[in-house]
Amino acid sequence: MTWGFVTCGPNEALVISGCCYSKPLLVPGGRAFIWPAVQQIQRISLNTMTLIVDSPTVYTSQGVPISVTGIAQVKIQGQNEEMLLAACEQFLGKPEAEIQHIALVTLEGHQRAIMGSMTVEEIYKDRKKFSKQVFEVASSDLVNMGITVVSYTLKDIRDEEGYLKSLGMARTAEVKRDARIGEAEARADATIKEAIAEEQRMASVFLNDTEIAKARRDFELKKAAYDVEVQTKNAEAEMAYELQAAKTKQRIKEEQMQIQVVERTQQINVQEQEIARRERELEATIRRPAEAEKFRLEKLAEANHKKVLLEAEADAEAVRLRGEAEAYAIEAKAQAEAEQMAKKAEAWKEYKEAAMIDMFLDVLPKVAAEVAAPLSQAKKITMVSTGSGDVGAAKLTGEVLDIVTKMPMLVKSMTGVDIAKSVRAA
């Protein structure tokens, strides 16, 4: 084995002895540095050991033999250095089974001693007291060996003589007796209490019926008074409701009129704003352009006026000259026509009827043309005949000729000149 560190788990302890140590170095669950040549290392278990402590046929203080089985948990104390050192002195190098046997023998001895100092009834009825005494007595002895009793519990109590069974039977009989007595007493008490309860119930019923009748009477009286009051209040409420409804309707009408006034006012404002907008629009789109156009036209008219004046002055001069020339020509023509008319007048004086006949003959073709002119413009002519006389174009021509032949009669009625007679005389 070489020198160096040696470790152990939490369930064991290192025991180092030899050079540098006057007494063994105890290291529970850790590590230590070892010099193999001059130091020795040993391990001791710190595991918890479960012991079944069985004590058969032990006589109690009354001389009754019983058997007891207990369960104990023990372990070597590793946190206390003195106890660990004592455990090392007692058990170092021994196997765990031997350690368990030593602890078990010690516990069994203490368990038997305490069984002998107590009665069966004490052990049977107060198991916690028995377990506590065994725990305390065994702990005081095992601690000197470095062993701690972690726990002790009484598991079982037996007896081969039937003492416990008899004790149980007596207790059972006692319990049954007490139960029967208690049941009878309870039944009697229940019967008495039921009678009392029934009496109280009937009294309560009668009292309750009386109170109910009284309450019903008071209720009817109060109800009649309440009905009168309620009807009065209902009538007042109905009148108040109708009055309030009328007031509400009036207020609603006033609010509606106010709303209409506001709406009319808003409409008027909107219309005024619309009129103002249209005036501005008219001002922007019509008046100002019209004024501009008017100004432009006025300037153009003024320019044209000046131009016309200038042209008129020039034309006036030309017209004056032209007028003088035309006047001279008209005067000459008038003189010629006057002379011609004078000669015609003189001729008409001499040839009055002949002249009128001549004029009539000159005008007659024109009259015929004017009569026929409407007919020439017609696209369609519908003629109705009675079946006698001319039909078609002959009828139309006859009508035109009939109109023309009436012309001499018209001239005769107007001038007194008989054209037809003058034509026949010629």
Image: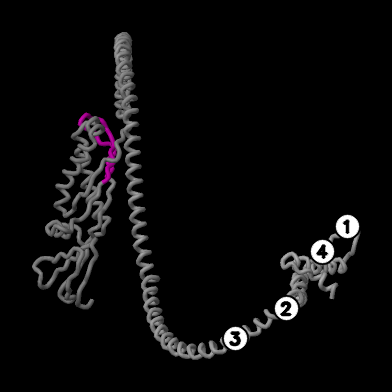
Residue 282 is left or right of residue 39, and the answer is right
Q: Nearer the viewer, mark 2 or mark 1?
A: 2
Q: Which residue is mark 3?
A: 335
Residue drawn at the location 13% of the way across and 66% of the way down = 24
Residue drawn at the location 46% of the way across and 87% of the way down = 316
Q: Magenta part of the protein: which range? A: 53-71
> Can residue 177 be seen in the rendering of this structure?
no
Judge by depth and name the residue closer to the eye, 120 or 425. 425
Identity, as a three-letter code, of the amino acid under mark 4 = Thr
Quadrant for the C terminus, please. Answer: bottom right
Quarter location, residue 366: bottom right
Lower sequence index among marks 1 and 3: 3
Residue drawn at the location 32% of the way across and 37% of the way down = 251
With respect to residue 420, does 137 lie above or below? above
Q: Residue furthest front?
A: 350
Identity, as a three-letter code, of the amino acid under mark 2 = Glu
CB of mark 4 within 8 Å of CB of mark 3?
A: no
Locate residue 100, reporting x and y percent. 25, 53
**Mark linked to residue 350:** 2
Q: Which residue is mark 1?
A: 386
**Mark linked to residue 382:** 4
Residue 273 is left or right of residue 133, and the answer is right
Lower sequence index among marks 2 and 3: 3
Quarter location, residue 311: bottom left
